[in-house]
Image (tube, rainbow, N blue to C red):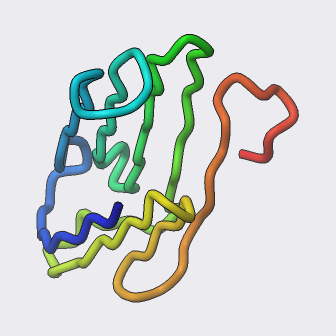
Amino acid sequence: SNISLFFNTLEPNGTLFELFASPSRSNRPGTTKILGALIDGRFRLIMIDGGPKQQDFELRSEDRLNDGRVHQIELDLNHYQLNIDRLHNETLRKFSDPFAPT
Protein backbone atom coordinates (compact mmCIF):
# COMPACT_ATOMS: atom_id res chain seq x y z
CA SER A 1 0.00 0.00 0.00
CA ASN A 2 1.15 3.50 -0.76
CA ILE A 3 0.02 6.81 0.71
CA SER A 4 0.95 10.19 -0.71
CA LEU A 5 -0.14 13.61 0.49
CA PHE A 6 0.81 17.27 0.39
CA PHE A 7 0.49 19.59 3.39
CA ASN A 8 1.75 22.85 4.82
CA THR A 9 1.50 24.12 8.39
CA LEU A 10 3.14 26.26 11.01
CA GLU A 11 1.77 24.12 13.86
CA PRO A 12 4.37 21.91 15.59
CA ASN A 13 1.92 19.19 16.68
CA GLY A 14 -1.12 17.59 15.08
CA THR A 15 -2.57 14.62 13.26
CA LEU A 16 -2.20 14.57 9.46
CA PHE A 17 -4.08 11.31 8.89
CA GLU A 18 -5.46 8.28 10.71
CA LEU A 19 -6.30 4.97 9.01
CA PHE A 20 -7.83 1.74 10.29
CA ALA A 21 -7.91 -1.75 8.76
CA SER A 22 -10.68 -3.82 10.29
CA PRO A 23 -10.69 -7.64 10.45
CA SER A 24 -13.42 -7.82 7.81
CA ARG A 25 -11.11 -6.10 5.29
CA SER A 26 -7.96 -8.03 6.09
CA ASN A 27 -6.99 -11.69 6.29
CA ARG A 28 -5.72 -11.35 9.87
CA PRO A 29 -7.62 -10.98 13.10
CA GLY A 30 -7.44 -7.68 14.98
CA THR A 31 -7.47 -4.08 13.84
CA THR A 32 -4.43 -2.26 12.47
CA LYS A 33 -4.18 1.47 13.10
CA ILE A 34 -1.91 3.82 11.13
CA LEU A 35 -1.41 7.35 12.42
CA GLY A 36 0.57 10.11 10.69
CA ALA A 37 1.32 13.14 12.83
CA LEU A 38 3.69 16.00 13.49
CA ILE A 39 5.36 15.91 16.90
CA ASP A 40 7.58 18.90 17.64
CA GLY A 41 7.46 19.69 13.91
CA ARG A 42 8.80 16.26 12.92
CA PHE A 43 6.75 13.64 11.08
CA ARG A 44 5.96 10.40 12.89
CA LEU A 45 4.10 7.45 11.46
CA ILE A 46 2.89 5.00 14.07
CA MET A 47 1.48 1.59 13.12
CA ILE A 48 -0.23 -0.53 15.73
CA ASP A 49 -0.90 -4.07 14.57
CA GLY A 50 -3.72 -5.38 16.77
CA GLY A 51 -3.33 -9.00 15.66
CA PRO A 52 -2.74 -11.96 17.98
CA LYS A 53 0.93 -10.97 18.40
CA GLN A 54 0.48 -7.22 18.78
CA GLN A 55 3.38 -5.26 17.32
CA ASP A 56 3.91 -1.51 17.30
CA PHE A 57 6.14 0.21 14.74
CA GLU A 58 7.27 3.75 14.05
CA LEU A 59 8.61 5.51 10.95
CA ARG A 60 10.12 8.88 11.68
CA SER A 61 11.78 11.91 10.17
CA GLU A 62 14.14 14.24 11.98
CA ASP A 63 13.48 17.16 9.59
CA ARG A 64 11.20 19.93 10.87
CA LEU A 65 8.18 20.29 8.59
CA ASN A 66 6.20 23.05 10.33
CA ASP A 67 7.82 25.85 8.31
CA GLY A 68 4.77 26.90 6.25
CA ARG A 69 6.17 25.43 3.03
CA VAL A 70 4.40 22.72 1.04
CA HIS A 71 5.78 19.26 1.82
CA GLN A 72 5.03 15.90 0.24
CA ILE A 73 4.92 12.71 2.28
CA GLU A 74 5.10 9.39 0.43
CA LEU A 75 4.72 6.22 2.42
CA ASP A 76 5.38 2.73 1.07
CA LEU A 77 3.88 0.35 3.65
CA ASN A 78 4.99 -2.74 1.73
CA HIS A 79 8.67 -1.80 2.05
CA TYR A 80 8.39 0.31 5.22
CA GLN A 81 9.88 3.37 3.56
CA LEU A 82 9.15 7.01 4.23
CA ASN A 83 9.95 9.69 1.64
CA ILE A 84 9.55 13.37 2.45
CA ASP A 85 9.92 15.88 -0.37
CA ARG A 86 11.09 13.00 -2.62
CA LEU A 87 14.02 12.14 -0.32
CA HIS A 88 14.29 8.77 1.42
CA ASN A 89 14.09 9.44 5.11
CA GLU A 90 13.81 6.81 7.76
CA THR A 91 12.96 3.17 8.04
CA LEU A 92 10.94 1.01 10.36
CA ARG A 93 11.60 0.84 14.08
CA LYS A 94 9.81 -1.69 16.25
CA PHE A 95 8.60 -0.22 19.57
CA SER A 96 8.74 -3.48 21.48
CA ASP A 97 12.38 -4.19 20.53
CA PRO A 98 14.65 -2.56 23.16
CA PHE A 99 17.69 -2.89 20.88
CA ALA A 100 16.20 -1.08 17.87
CA PRO A 101 17.98 2.14 16.88
CA THR A 102 16.15 5.37 17.64
* Quadrant assignment for the C terminus: top right
Q: Position of residue 54 (x, y in %)?
A: 56, 16
Task: Report which quarter residue 34 is drawn in.
Answer: top left
Residue for point 15% across, 74% down: 6
Residue 101 vs residue 63, the one in the foreground: 101
Left or right, 67 with reference to 9: right
Q: Nearer the viewer, residue 50 or 23?
A: 23
Which residue occupies the extreme bottom position in the image? 86
**Furthest-top residue in this view:** 52
Residue displayed at 39% across by 76% down: 84
- Residue 21 location (% of width, % of height): 26, 32
Q: Quadrant of the N terminus?
A: bottom left
Image vertical order of residue 56 relative to residue 38, above or below: above
Q: Which of 57 and 66 is in front in this view?
A: 57
User: Is residue 10 positioned above or below 29 on the image?
Assistant: below
Determine whether, in the image, residue 92 is placed left or right of residue 42. right
Q: Which of 8 and 89 is in front in this view?
A: 89
- Residue that extends furthest to the right in the rendered view of this protein: 99
Residue drawn at x 17%, y 80% as measured from the top left: 69
Q: In this view, does 53 lie to the left or right of 29?
A: right
Residue at 70% from the left image edge and 23% from the top image edge: 96
Residue 62 placement (x, y as % from top left):
53, 62
